[in-house]
């Protein structure tokens, strides 16, 4: 009986080992963290033979402009970008040490990597979107050369909150008070419709066709970042 138990134990250990080795489905998976008021992080994870072999980490400002670590004035964030990917590979999981002075960036990359590995797990998701807040960017308007950045909060595949800002060509934020009352009303109308409509597909608001289209594009970009597969 002891010998038989030993055989079963060895089989169980080998089985668990094989499962661990084939934990992920081969491919390239990208996912995003929740967006804060200041930034959002992305993680692109490369899986080969069921293992994490490389991770590329990026971070974007609240204007949805990628940060350049060679010029970014906060070296701790650049250090986190350079070192966390290697830890994810070494740990074969979304596990890494928080870099002192770059807590927000570190936790964002851990969350983004965790979501990428959920995509790589091969398990069929129950929701189309991850719950959370995601940053989206519109195309640049031919009139005024500005673009929109939106924060879209999703819960159970529905938009439950929406915030927007207009980014001018010089990368400053336009004060909503400068829009004038018709566009201000249209912004409020779009937000109300976004909370009720199919995510990313608000019908054109009378007198604000450009605003509606641009806002829809930004929302859909945020939704793309929220996809679970």
Image (cartoon, rainbow, N blue to C red):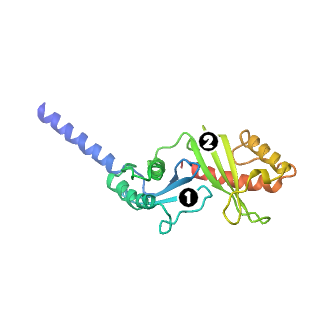
Q: Residue 52 is drawn in which quadrant?
A: bottom left
Please give the label number shown on residue 229: none
Residue 209 percent across, percent down from the top left: 83, 54
Please give the label number shown on residue 154: 2
Q: Earlier in the sequence, mark 1 or mark 2?
A: 1
Q: How many marks?
A: 2
Q: Nearer the viewer, residue 207 or 65?
A: 65
Q: Is residue 91 above or below residue 139?
A: above
Residue 38 percent across, percent down from the top left: 57, 52
- Going 63% across and 58% down the picture, which residue do you hit? 63
- Going 30% across and 48% down the picture, which residue do you hit? 18
Kindly give the residue lying farthest to the right in the view shown: 207
Crowding at dot 2, Cα within 10 Å, few <14 / some 14-19 / many 20+, comes out as many
Secondary structure at numbered mark 1: strand
Q: Nearer the viewer, residue 137 or 38?
A: 38
Residue 109 percent across, percent down from the top left: 46, 52
Secondary structure at numbered mark 2: strand
Please give the label number shown on residue 60: 1
Q: Is residue 151 visible?
A: yes
Residue 121 percent across, percent down from the top left: 44, 47
């Amino acid at each position: 009986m002891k010998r038989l138990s030993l055989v079963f134990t060895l089989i169980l250990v080998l089985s668990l080992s094989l499962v661990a080795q084939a934990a992920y489905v081969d491919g390239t998976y990208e996912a995003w963290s929740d967006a804060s008021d200041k930034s959002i992080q992305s993680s692109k994870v490369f899986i080969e033979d069921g293992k994490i072999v490389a991770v590329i980490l990026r971070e974007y400002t609240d204007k949805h402009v990628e940060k350049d670590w060679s010029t970014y004035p906060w070296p701790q964030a650049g250090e986190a970008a350079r070192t966390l990917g290697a830890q994810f590979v070494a740990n074969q999981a979304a596990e890494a040490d928080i870099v002192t002075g770059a807590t927000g960036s570190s936790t964002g990359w851990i969350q983004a990597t965790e979501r990428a590995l959920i995509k790589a797990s091969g398990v069929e998701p129950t929701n189309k979107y991850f719950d959370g807040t995601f940053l989206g960017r519109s195309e640049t308007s031919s009139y005024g050369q500005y673009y929109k950045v939106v924060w879209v909060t999703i819960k159970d595949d529905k938009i439950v909150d929406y915030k927007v800002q207009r980014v001018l060509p010089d990368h400053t934020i336009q004060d909503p008070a400068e829009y004038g009352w018709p566009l201000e009303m249209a912004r409020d109308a779009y937000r109300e419709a976004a909370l009720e409509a199919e995510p990313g597909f608000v019908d054109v608001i009378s007198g604000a066709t450009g605003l509606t289209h641009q806002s829809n594009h930004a929302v859909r970009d945020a939704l793309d970042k929220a996809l679970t597969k």
